Image: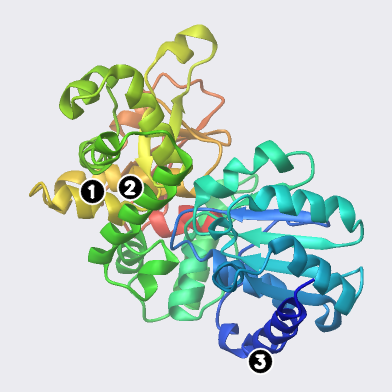
C-alpha cells in the first residue's frame, strides 16, 4: 500500500477532531440511523448533508471515529478501499468511518461493498452532493445499506438554526382543538416578541439550510449543478435534452398540475422523454411527485401532481416569467406541505395525510372547500392558514400555519 495513504488517514483524523467546535451551533438532523453498519445520506444539494454527517460523527466515541473527505481522496488519487483498509489497520476493527462527498469517487459503491464484507465490525455512514448518485448505489448496496433522506428544514429545525430556540413538537392527540390552543399559547410564550405569522412567511422562503447563508438568487446555480452535474452524469439524456430541464422547471413553477402532452409540445420532446425528465428532477430532490387520494386502477390512471421541495425555487423561476409571488403563493403553500409530510395524497381538498383532510390557504381562507369535500367523514377536516387564531366550526379545525407545521 502506498505510504501516503496512512499519512492521509492520520492527517484527516487530526484535522477533523480539531474542527469539531465550529459545528457546535448546528442541530443534529439525522433520524433513524439505528445500529446499521452502513448508512447512506442523500438529499437535495444545500440540504445540509455535510453538516448533518459531521454532527453524527461528533456523537461517536473519539477513539473509534474517523471522518474522511472523498473529494480530497480523489484529488490525491488515493484509492477508497486502500483508505478504509489503512484506517482499520491503524485504529482497529471497531471503527466508525464517516465519508463525505462520496459521489465524487467513480465506482465508490463497489469499493464500499468490498469493505463492508471484508471488515465485519466496521461501521460506515456516507453522504454526497448528488442525490441521484447516492441513490444509484442501491443496485450494489441495497441489502447492506439503509438510506436516510435528508429533507429540507422543518419549521422547528428552522427556528432552532435561524433563531437558536428549541421548540417542542406539537401533538394533535385525542383532543386536537384543546391541544392546539395550548400549543399556540406555548409558542407565544416561547417566541415572545416575535410576529409568528411573519416567522412563518420567513420560513416558507428559507426552508433549506443553504438559504440561511446565501441569497435566493443563487438557487439557480444549485439547480444547474443538479442538472448538468448530477443528472448529466447518471442518465442517458442527450445534451439537447439536458438544456431543456430548466424550461421544464419553468413550466412546473406556474402550476402543480402536469400534462405530459402539454409538456411534450412546450419542450419539443417526445412524450416518452417527459416522464424520465420528471423522474430525474424527483431523484435530484428538486420536486416531489404526489399521488391522488383514490384507490384502485382509476387512481393509477390519473396524472400526478408535482411540488417543489423548496418553495423559493418555484418563486425564483416563476419570477423570471414575470409572475408575481402573490399569484403562486397557494402553490408555494402546497410545496411546503409536500416537503414536510410523508405519505401525503392530493384530493378535492389540498391533501390527505395521517387521517386528516387538509386545506391550505391565506389569512382570509374560509371553510367552504372543507365543508363540501367528498373526503370520507372518518378523516378530520383541517384548514391551515396564515392567520393568528385556533378555532373550530362545524367540526372543522382551523389552525395557524405555525401551529400545524410544528407537528413535523
What number is the disc on residue 329? Answer: 1
Secondary structure under the numbered disc 2 in the rendered image: helix
Circle 3 sits on which residue?
A: 18
Q: Do the numbered discs 1 and 2 sit on residues whose CB atoms are within 8 Å?
A: yes
Q: Rounded to the nearest whole Å, what is the CA distance between mark 1 and mark 3?
A: 45 Å
Does any portion of residue 40 appear in the rendered image? Answer: yes
Camera-side residue of 305 and 368: 305
Asked whether, in this view, residue 8 is left or right of residue 348, the answer is: right
Asked whether, in this view, residue 215 is left or right of residue 371, the answer is: left
Pick out the residue farthest to the left: 322
Q: Residues within 10 Å of mark 2 (few under 14, many from 20)?
A: many
Circle 2 sits on which residue?
A: 333
Residue at x 48% of width, y 42% of height: 234
Looking at the image, is mark 1 or mark 3 earlier in the sequence? 3
Snapshot quadrant of residue 30: bottom right
Secondary structure under the numbered disc 1 in the rendered image: helix
Secondary structure under the numbered disc 3 in the rendered image: helix
Q: Rounded to the nearest whole Å, what is the CA distance between mark 2 and mark 3?
A: 42 Å
Q: Residue 318, image x and y in percent? A: 17, 47
Q: Residue 32, image x and y in percent? A: 72, 55
Pick out the residue farthest to the top: 297
Residue at x 54% of width, y 59% of height: 104
Q: Indicate the quadrant containing the N terminus: top left, top right, bottom left or bottom right.
A: bottom right
Camera-side residue of 187 and 41: 41
Does any portion of residue 147 appear in the rendered image? Answer: no
80 vs 193: above or below: above
**Between marks 2 and 3 in the image, the one whose residue lies nearer the viewer:** 3
Looking at the image, is mark 2 or mark 3 earlier in the sequence? 3
Q: Residues within 10 Å of mark 3 (few under 14, many from 20)?
A: few
Q: Residue 382, image x and y in percent? A: 44, 39
What number is the disc on residue 3? Answer: none
Snapshot quadrant of residue 65: bottom right
Amino acid at each position: 500500500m502506498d505510504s501516503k495513504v496512512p499519512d492521509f488517514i492520520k492527517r484527516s483524523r487530526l484535522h477533523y477532531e480539531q474542527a469539531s467546535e465550529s459545528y457546535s451551533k448546528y442541530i443534529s438532523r439525522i433520524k433513524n440511523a439505528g445500529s446499521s453498519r452502513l448508512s447512506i445520506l442523500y438529499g437535495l444539494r444545500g440540504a445540509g448533508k455535510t453538516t448533518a454527517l459531521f454532527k453524527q460523527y461528533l456523537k461517536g466515541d473519539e477513539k473509534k471515529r474517523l471522518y474522511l473527505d472523498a473529494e480530497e481522496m480523489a484529488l490525491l488519487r488515493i484509492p477508497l478501499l486502500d483508505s478504509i483498509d489503512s484506517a482499520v489497520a491503524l485504529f482497529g476493527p471497531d471503527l466508525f468511518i464517516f465519508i463525505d462527498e462520496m459521489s465524487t469517487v467513480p465506482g465508490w459503491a463497489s469499493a464500499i461493498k468490498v469493505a463492508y464484507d471484508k471488515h465485519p465490525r466496521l461501521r460506515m455512514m456516507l453522504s454526497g452532493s448528488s442525490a441521484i448518485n447516492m441513490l444509484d448505489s442501491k443496485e450494489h448496496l441495497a441489502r447492506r445499506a439503509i438510506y436516510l433522506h435528508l429533507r429540507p428544514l422543518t419549521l422547528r429545525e428552522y427556528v432552532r438554526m435561524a433563531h437558536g430556540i428549541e421548540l417542542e413538537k406539537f401533538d394533535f392527540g385525542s383532543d386536537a382543538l384543546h391541544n392546539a390552543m395550548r400549543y399556540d399559547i406555548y409558542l407565544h410564550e416561547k417566541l415572545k416578541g416575535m410576529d409568528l405569522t411573519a416567522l412563518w412567511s420567513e420560513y416558507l422562503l428559507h426552508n433549506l439550510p443553504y438559504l440561511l447563508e446565501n441569497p435566493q438568487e443563487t438557487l439557480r446555480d444549485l439547480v444547474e449543478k443538479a442538472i448538468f452535474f448530477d443528472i448529466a452524469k447518471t442518465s442517458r439524456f442527450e445534451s439537447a435534452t439536458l438544456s431543456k430541464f430548466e424550461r421544464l422547471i419553468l413550466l412546473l413553477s406556474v402550476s402543480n398540475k402536469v400534462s405530459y402532452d402539454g409538456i411534450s409540445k412546450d419542450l419539443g420532446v417526445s412524450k416518452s422523454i417527459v416522464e424520465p425528465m420528471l423522474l430525474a428532477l424527483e431523484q435530484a430532490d428538486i420536486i416531489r411527485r404526489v399521488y391522488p387520494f383514490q384507490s384502485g386502477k382509476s387512481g393509477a390512471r390519473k396524472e400526478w401532481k408535482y411540488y417543489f421541495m423548496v418553495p423559493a425555487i418555484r418563486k425564483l423561476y416563476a419570477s423570471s416569467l414575470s409572475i408575481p409571488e402573490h399569484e403562486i403563493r397557494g402553490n408555494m403553500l402546497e410545496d411546503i406541505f409536500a416537503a414536510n409530510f410523508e405519505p401525503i395524497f392530493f384530493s378535492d381538498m389540498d391533501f390527505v395525510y395521517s387521517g386528516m383532510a387538509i386545506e391550505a390557504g391565506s389569512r382570509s381562507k374560509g371553510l367552504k372547500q372543507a365543508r363540501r369535500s367528498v373526503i370520507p367523514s372518518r378523516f378530520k377536516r383541517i384548514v391551515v392558514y396564515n392567520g393568528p387564531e385556533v378555532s373550530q366550526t362545524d367540526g372543522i379545525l382551523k389552525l395557524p400555519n405555525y401551529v400545524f407545521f410544528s407537528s413535523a
